[in-house]
Each structure stands twice: as C-alpha cells, then as structure tokens.
Image (tube, rainbow, N blue to C red):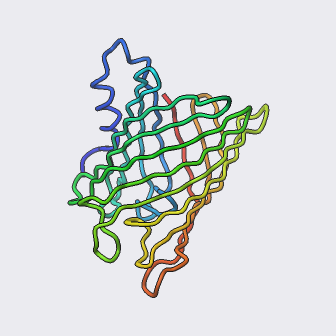
C-alpha cells in the first residue's frame, strides 16, 4: 500500500491553488478509531487517517477534497479520495442553503466510483446549529444494490449541534434514512444515528460519538443492525 494516500487529496488541492489564494484554504487532519459513514463502518472497524481541505472561491462557491486511508487494510475501500464543488450562502435571517456535487473515488477498487449531489438547509443562532437535507446519487454504472441491479440512492438527514456557553464543549445529535444502492438490504431502507460530544481548543478537537444503523426490513443473512463508539482526534489548519 502507498504511504498515506489520504494526504494526496489535500496536497492536490493545495498544488492547484495560486500562492496569493493560499489564505483561502482551510481544512483538517484527523485520526478516527473507525471510519463510519451514515452509520456503517467503511474501514471494517479499523482506525483511519483522514484529511479534508476546502478552497474558498468567493461569492459562496468552494472547491473541496477529502481523503481517507486505513493503514492496516479496510477491504476494497481502504483508500477513498473525494472531490467536491459547491455553493453556500444565506437565504434570509438565520437560514442558509448549501448545495454541492461530489465525486467519490476508490483507488485500487474496480467499478466503485460514483457521483452524488446534496442540498442542505441550515439554521444557526447563538450556540445552536441545526441542519437538514437530502443527498441523491442518480442511477449510474457503478451503483449496484445487494440484488445485483443498477440503482440510484436517496438519503435524507437532519442534525443539531449545541455548544455549551463559556466552554469549548459541544453536543450533537443526528439521524438519517437511506434507500437504494447503499441501504444494504434487498427489501430496502436503513436508519442511522449519531450522538456525541466534542471539545475544541487551540486548533485541536477531540470527540466521541456513538454511531449506529438498523435495517428494519432486513431478511435472513442480511446485517440488521450495527453500532459502535467512534473516537477522533483532529487538527484544523
């Protein structure tokens, strides 16, 4: 396996940014005890190194990148590299809208890449940040459901983060429902949730989240539920 391929996502973004625009790049490097996405482990329960970066293009537009690497193997998704193009801005009062298109790429894993678009409506006031949205991956060549058929994927989600006044601690709660290529059940439908707390200070963030997923209509032989505690240590830049 190549050395730290997750770092390539941030490095590639930095490489195409003119020096004069370098101050508009932000991001985070993070170590997680388990890479869980929408409640499901993509690293087979193993720790992962992750890097994200974003270039502010002005007028609300941005270019983002994300990379994840499982040093000791994580199945076909041991390496993930994503590219994101989006826009965000206020739509009135405390409301904000964000829309983006993402390309998910898995080096070394054949026929896994796909595109997805996401729309999110957010509300922020004081120490409270609430968001809800929908992500849609249209039917495409590499999206195959558990029955072996080409399929699209639809995911609805909502979450809230509440900071504790005069402390570096925040609490969060989120849930989502997924149906399509990624729900993991022939009869379809997956619920996921996340509840946790984080502490941020001096550019570092430590967090703990209890994450899980359940497939109410799973049949014999299909995973009905999974859950676990995810610990993370991150450094923003």
Q: Nearer the viewer, residue 108 or 125?
A: 125
Which of the pair 229/191 is nearer the observer? 191
Q: What x and y, as percent, mark residue 13?
A: 32, 30
Q: Is residue 125 above or below residue 192?
A: above
Residue 80: percent from the left, percent from the top? 33, 50
Find residue 206 and report its horizontal and vertical position in percent. 60, 43
Does residue 80 appear to the left or right of 165 in the view shown? left
Residue under the image location 34 percent in, 56 percent down: 138
Q: Is residue 36 visible?
A: no
Residue appearing at x 34%, y 44% in the figure? 82
Placement of 19 over or under 139, stated as above or below:
above
Q: Quadrant of residue 185?
A: bottom left
In this rendering, position of residue 161 left or right of residue 132: right
Residue 176 appears in the picture as rendered: yes
Q: Residue at x 42, y 27 (%)?
A: 61
Which residue is depicted at the point 63% across and 29% down? 92
């Amino acid at each position: 396996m190549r050395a730290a391929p997750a770092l390539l996502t941030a490095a590639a973004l930095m490489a195409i940014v003119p020096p004069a625009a370098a101050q508009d790049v932000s991001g985070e490097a993070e170590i997680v005890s388990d890479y869980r996405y929408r409640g499901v482990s993509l690293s087979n329960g193993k720790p992962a190194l992750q890097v994200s970066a974003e270039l502010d293009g002005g007028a609300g537009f941005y270019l983002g990148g994300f990379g994840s690497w499982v040093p000791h193997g994580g199945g076909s998704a041991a390496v993930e590299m994503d590219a994101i193009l989006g826009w965000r801005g206020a739509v009135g009062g405390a409301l904000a809208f964000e829309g983006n298109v993402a390309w998910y790429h898995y080096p070394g894993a054949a026929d896994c890449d796909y595109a997805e678009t996401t729309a999110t409506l957010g509300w922020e006031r004081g120490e409270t940040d609430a968001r809800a949205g929908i992500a849609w991956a249209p039917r495409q060549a590499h999206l195959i459901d558990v029955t072996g058929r080409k399929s699209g994927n639809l995911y609805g989600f909502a979450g809230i983060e509440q900071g504790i006044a005069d402390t570096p601690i925040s609490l969060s709660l989120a849930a989502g429902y997924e149906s399509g290529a990624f729900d993991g059940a022939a009869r379809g439908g997956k619920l996921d949730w996340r509840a946790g707390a984080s502490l941020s200070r001096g550019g570092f963030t430590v967090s703990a989240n209890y994450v899980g997923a359940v497939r109410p209509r799973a049949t014999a032989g299909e995973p009905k539920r999974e859950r676990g505690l995810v610990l993370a240590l991150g450094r923003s830049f």
